[in-house]
Amino acid sequence: MASVMKVLSKPLTPEEREKAFKSSKKVEVLARQRLPVRYHVEDFDVEDRPRRFLEAFASILKHTNYRLALDHYIRVTTRCARCAVACPIYDATHDPHDIPCYRSELLLSIYRRHFTVSGVLRARLLGDPGLTDEKIQELADSYYNCTACRRCHFECPMGIDHALITHLGRYILSEIGIAPRALVVSTREQLTGATGNTSAIPVPALIDTLEFLTEDIQDEKGIHVPFPVDQEGAEYIFFTAVSDYMMEAETLKGIAAVMKATGGSWTIGTGYYDGINYGLFYSDQVMEHALQKMQVEAKRLGAKKILMGECGHASRTAKYFYPTYCGGKDALPVISILEYTQQALKEGRIKLDPSIVTERVTYHDPCNFSRTGWIVNQPREVLKAFCADYEEMAPNGRSNLCCGGGGGTVSIDEVRPYRTTVSGRLKAEQIRRTGAHYCVAPCANCKKQLRELVEDQGVECEILGLHDLIYKAIILPPDPKPEEELDETAGGSVKLSKGGES
Amino acid sequence: MPNYEAGGRVYEVDEDGFLQDPDLWSDDVAKDFMSTEGISELTEEHWKVIHYIRNYYLQFGIAPMVRKVCKQTGFSLKEIYNLFPSGPAKGACKLAGLPKPTGCV
């Protein structure tokens, strides 16, 4: 199938443009915050922003090693704009401001002007007044128009990782109070709130949900499939996007079924059960604190490995940043459920009935899984093992297109028109062209965005997780006898009431 | 905080139009807020979903899992979307007076 980027590169119509960039924000809020962005921001100190921005920037440079990357990037950047061809946003807007290296230059120019000797001298000679409030406003708008999909860094001849610069820009902005409220409110609940997770799900509700899921599987399959809770010494401690416990029953049922079939020793900890880490999208400090919570809970239960559910950013954060912040080489290994299931299938420990899913299936690569090449083939191997009618999108794998809701933008409901008109436009066309009945997207972010996308773009396709399909097709061994149920799996099943008090 | 006015009553709401104080909920709230969700009339089916979500919230402090809403009320997900066009996590929760869901919901 031909790449949609080659076939469909026409800019938005004026009507689409108006819809995508319309702001629902009230005039008085825009005036009060002096920040023309479409996402909501909690009120913050608007005075003297350039000075505070530079102080935050200086502080981050002092305490991190971003300077290494920035020093290199300002030397090699040529602003050749080759990255434009890789960017789905630019493909839609054809606006030079949306070329990745233009976006990066916004921050690099501040770095060059204020944090290098030559920049400071040059500014003295030329009388450059330095960072202005207008530039901060442009940054705040521009850096959340990018979905941080990291597709552009493949095209850069100089190897610049534009998404790293976007990440740093957002981090600095958040230090002066500019960050989407949707992300801030969620992480506040996660790090300091009573429930300790981004969707504010209390433990009794979690337990009720897990009990319900076990009953649901019993009703549908006639087999007892437990969700072990607070099992000390389990091999795997399981973290998923906590929103799955509200939205993704089928995914969770599929995962539990796989764990049951393979006799996997796993547990969900009631001390902390959220894999989400929005720190990846706007703040290294938030990222560190959320990862430490994960570490504390894994230690509490004496788990040997961390098992991540179907969520791209959560898995990537755990895989690549958890060792950085929690223990280095001694950090627990991090494994995605996609890897676990593929391995189990390869070893013949799960059986999938190939006659169940007869409709056409396609696979959407979540950027946070595929861009590094970490998880590309594993889910495909699983799907091809039991889905007869499997169709690829183009492009796919490492050079896939973002769902349009990456970089935390999917949680920002007020930018939905932008996500489904601009950043997700090519993805909608990709899905449409496969003619698939099911689009598998093993990521909580991608699922939410793709469902909104197919709805807004009128594409007939059901979006679901990999384990949703597995759940339909998995052949579970029958339970021996009802009374033996409670001690039959390797991990030890558990009475769900143990972990929580209602 | 913005205000929302309907049915001769004034409500404090957040930027997304969700009731600011979930304790101030009554059936009137659902009736007054339905137009913001593109609903012209609240049928018995709407009330069944709203009351289920509301009671679950009072017991557990959070909205129930979508699958549980479907199973307990007997409606398919599609039927729930027909009743509440913006979905169970948004529209139905708004009319049931719950706070706006956070995270990836």
Image: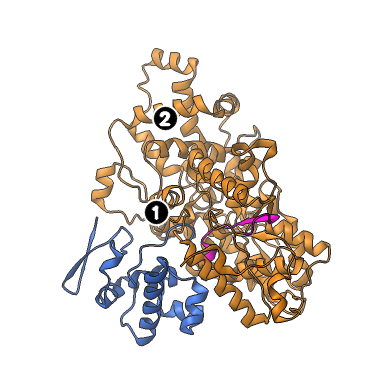
Q: Residues within 10 Å of mark 1 (few under 14, many from 20)?
A: some
The correct choice, above or below, for B17 with respect to A58 in the image is: below
> How many angstroms separate mark 2 from mark 1 (CA)?
29 Å
Instruction: Look at the image and say whether residue A246 sits in the magenta stretch.
Output: no
Q: Residue at x 31, y 41 (%)?
A: A44
The correct choice, above or below, for A76 with respect to A438 in the image is: above
For the record, the magenta segment spans A231-245
Q: In this rendering, does residue A396 appear at all?
A: no
Q: Judge left or right: residue A344 versus residue A304.
A: right
Chain A tint as drawn: orange
- Coloring applied to the structure: by chain
Q: Secondary structure at mark 2?
A: helix
Say the numbered circle drawn on residue A122. Answer: none
Query: Which chain is blue in the rendering?
Result: B
Q: Secondary structure at mark 1?
A: helix
> Residue A225: x, y in percent?
66, 73
Which residue bears the numbered disc 1? A21
Instruction: Look at the image and say whether residue A239 sits in the magenta stretch.
Output: yes
Say the numbered circle drawn on residue A56. Answer: 2
